Image: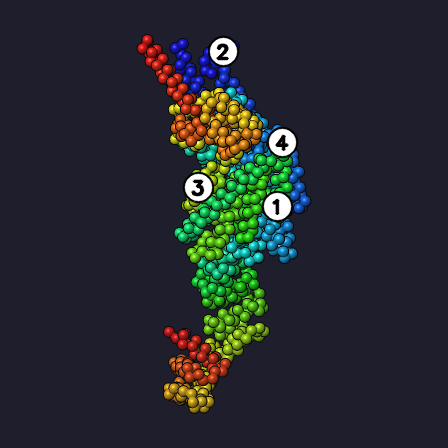
Amino acid sequence: LYGGACAACGRNRLYRIVHREILLLGVLSVVASLLFLGTRAAARANRRMRLQEAAVWYEQGRHDLQAGGTLDAITALRRAAAIDPGRPSYRFALADALARDGQSDAARQVLLTLRERTPEDPQVNASLARLEARRGSVAAASGYYESALYGAWMADQAAPRRQLRVEMIRYLLAHRQEQRALSQLLVLSANLPEDAGLQVEAGQLLMRAGDTRRALDHFRHALAVAPNDLSALAGAGEAAFGLEDYGRAHRYLHGIPHESDHLRRLAALAALVVRHDPLMPGLSGDERSRRLVGCLTHAAARVRSCARRADPESEPLPAGLDSLRAEALSLARGLAAGRRRRSSDVLESGTALILRIERAADAAHCPTAEVDQALSLIARKHESDRP
Amino acid sequence: MTTRPATFSQLRLRENQLFVAVTILIGVLSGLSAVLFAVAIERTSHYFFGFDPSPGRLLLVPVLVSLGTGVLLARVFPDARGSGVPQTKAAFHLQEGFIPARVPLGKFLTGVLCIGSGHSLGREGPSVQIGAGLASVVGRWLRLPSARVRDLVPVGAAGALSAAFNTPIAAVLFALEEIMGNLSAPLLGSTVIASVSAVIVERSILGNEPLFRVPTYHLVHPAELGAYALLGLVGGLLSLAFCKSLLALRKVFQRLPPWTRMLQPALGGLFVGALFIMAPQVMGVGYDFVDQALNGGLMFRTLLLLCGLKLVATVVSYASGNAGGIFAPSLYIGAMAGGAVGTLVQWFAPFPAGEPGAYAIVGMGTLFAGIIRAPMTSVFMIFEITQDYQILVPLMVANLLSFMISRRFQPAPVYHALLAQDDVHLPATTAGQGTPALAAGELMEPEAVLLPAEQSVEGAWQLAQANGGAAHLVGKRERVVGVLSLESLAKAVQAGRGNEALTSLVEGPILHVHPDHPVDIVLERLGRSHGILPVLSRHSARRLEGVITLDCITRFIHRRRASASADAAGRAET
């Protein structure tokens, strides 16, 4: 193979062989290049065909799903997803169909596969969160919700993102995760547009999470946009009531149709507080005195009626209750007769006495009227106002 | 003259560089062929079946197409039957890498038609044969030395498999472990180059997508390793069932009259067509459904049904002589079995268990290890296919068990057994072995007396007596059918069977050696024989190359001594 000289060129025969190899390699390279182009064209045509087929199955699946044929839809969507695994929407639709059919584990697998490819996809994470929520795994669901919220959202997707945050907050509140819900609520309230409905929704969620002050702010924002919005009025009234701002609560709740007993009761209580509170701002000295007398007299009357109605077989009334009643009547008489000075100290000690009576009467299971509740609210409010 | 050694070494270096260039080119060509093959199968399948085939189509297409491919496979491309891996191994070990140009062409054509028409066969085995065939053709076209052409066969195979599965590491391991039978082979560099070239080509055309998309699975509880071991056991038994039934049914088809060869693929097509009406999911390569199993998308009953039906469909499709491989079916069956075992574990295990999809992945590996018997390739292939590192330990546990069970009850690997059914005997794995110091080919004597198989027992006995010797071969030089001792002939004559044909006395396999067998095996087998040991060709294990007797060995020793004495005398004279 390697010996001898070439008769034509006088060189070693190996030169000829190597030169021939190079030439043939060149030819083969050209053939390979052409084959590459041909194969690529064929592969592209094939890919188009497969994509088309996958699209047909996808449409079929969607149609089946709409028609209620979940199992047929799953079969069709499975084929679509298998033929075109690169399209997340097919797998997503499949996961949706599986979840609807109750095949949560299978749906979860599909979504996890998707998540590995696009870990920041909000839709995938949100669906996983819903599946985990359905399984009762609060930690996993919260994690996926957070992944979804902090995922890759498009600039024009503020509304769905907000909706998802609201969904997460509702889920957290339903599972007694108030602190986590509050942190999400802070983000939500910071980015809310001037929309009455959204403000009301945020306010209601804040109320459920226990942040009444922020809730009131949102209701007031809503009322600024839509002053006659009944939900905003009701929410604001409830929030003001919760903040012991009964005057404001009465203003919000007064005159609006109340759909629930709770709101109706709040409105009535607020009205009573406004009517009886001796320390309400803007009242004259006489009026304050008159109201205090009224309150003391009512509290004393509650104790008296309680003592009269007391069942002989039940526990006797506490001994201190009678002395409290006597003290209340004495103070009321003194004020009515003008013997006691109408100072702020007297007013404060009067309200404190009312609170003591009401508490003692409650402890003795005396019957409670709305006025009694209002008196308790008044006394409690002023007790907390005291330094 | 003084410059000649320098020029010579320079040119040798250049030849090595050229070999590297050829390796790259073969990687590219085999990669392209594998991609084109896969694309052609999909197009053909779509052409035959459309999106949603009717039952009539499902039944008729495999039958009608197999009628055509039956003729092609029987008359034009007989080497294109079956997987292609055994033929490639035979070409590497026995034919110095010679694969005729019509083989890759025929394999491409018939493979596309068979698999495209729905036969439950894989595309990887044919891709390996096409790649190896192209390598052999290119090597010969470039007039490379035969040793280099032989070296190119595993290179082409690695390139094709790398592109077919998108698994470059596993392809290299497969070429070394399965084709060459030697993981420490010196061709590691060349196979790596071809594999990388092929996968670059494949990814540039199809994109860098793994074959299957699966979520990352974990070992949820240490006790799960026990469940994976159970899966290994199931995988081993299934592998065994697959191999045994495939070999048994293939033997049945081989025993049918030769004129039926053209019709056998259609017969298989009729059976699988009927099966497709019941379960079209087992048609063709079936990777779509493997993907579903890996993602936990199939129910327990479906998994069991598809596992069983795929096994039956593949055995029938392959045994009836269609063109297609068993890689993909083994992965399919494994995924279904694994998914089923995983579901059971999830239902009944007293510890927290992983998803059935994780078991489906491991199941693929166990079947591959059990059927193909390439455990290292199996582990790396599953790892590359799924790109899931977490599953490696369970995979190794299950693979090892499956491999051991399969090897215990089916000693010959399936590719070797398939070749043996075609009278091709591959040498044992050559790892760590060199060329024997003294081989049967040197000891044997080519001339031998054969008793014609159609002769009567009486006539044969007389002929044997006239020739002398304790035993005689029966048959023709091209087809030895057995060995008969003089004693057995005499007994038959005494028993009144003198008029029977000689073949009636021949029974069992022929105790033989091949020319490359070392002397220790020759002596051991000669000790068990009737005094005569036929030396048969590895290409065709019925063709006589020569015989070995004790006299032959004595004569060989004398010749050696005489030659040694002559050498010594020559040296003394010098």
Query: Tag 2: residue type?
Result: Cys
Query: Which label lies toward us, 3 or 2?
Result: 3
User: Do the residues under discs 3 and 1 have CB atoms within 8 angstroms?
Assistant: no
Q: CA distance from mark 3 to mark 1?
A: 32 Å
Q: Between residues B225 and A368, which one lies in front from this camera angle?
A: B225
Query: Tag 1: residue type?
Result: Leu
Q: Quick check: B256 above or below B227?
A: above
Q: Is residue B346 visible?
A: yes
Q: Quick check: A202 above or below B172?
A: below
Q: Chain of mark 2?
A: A
Helix, strand or loop under label 4 = helix
Tell me which residue sits at (54%, 35%) in the image: B83
Q: Which mark is residue B408?
A: 3
Q: Chain of mark 3?
A: B
Q: Which mark is residue B72?
A: 4
Q: Between residues B554 and A236, which one lies in front from this camera angle?
A: B554
Picture coordinates of residue A247, whole percent (x, y):
50, 74
The tag earlier along the polypeptide, 4 or 1, is 4
Residue tagged by mark 2? A6
Q: Between residues B157 and A213, which one lies in front from this camera angle?
A: B157
Residue tagged by mark 1? B275
Query: Tag 3: residue type?
Result: Arg
Helix, strand or loop under label 1 = helix
Q: Is residue A182 visible?
A: no
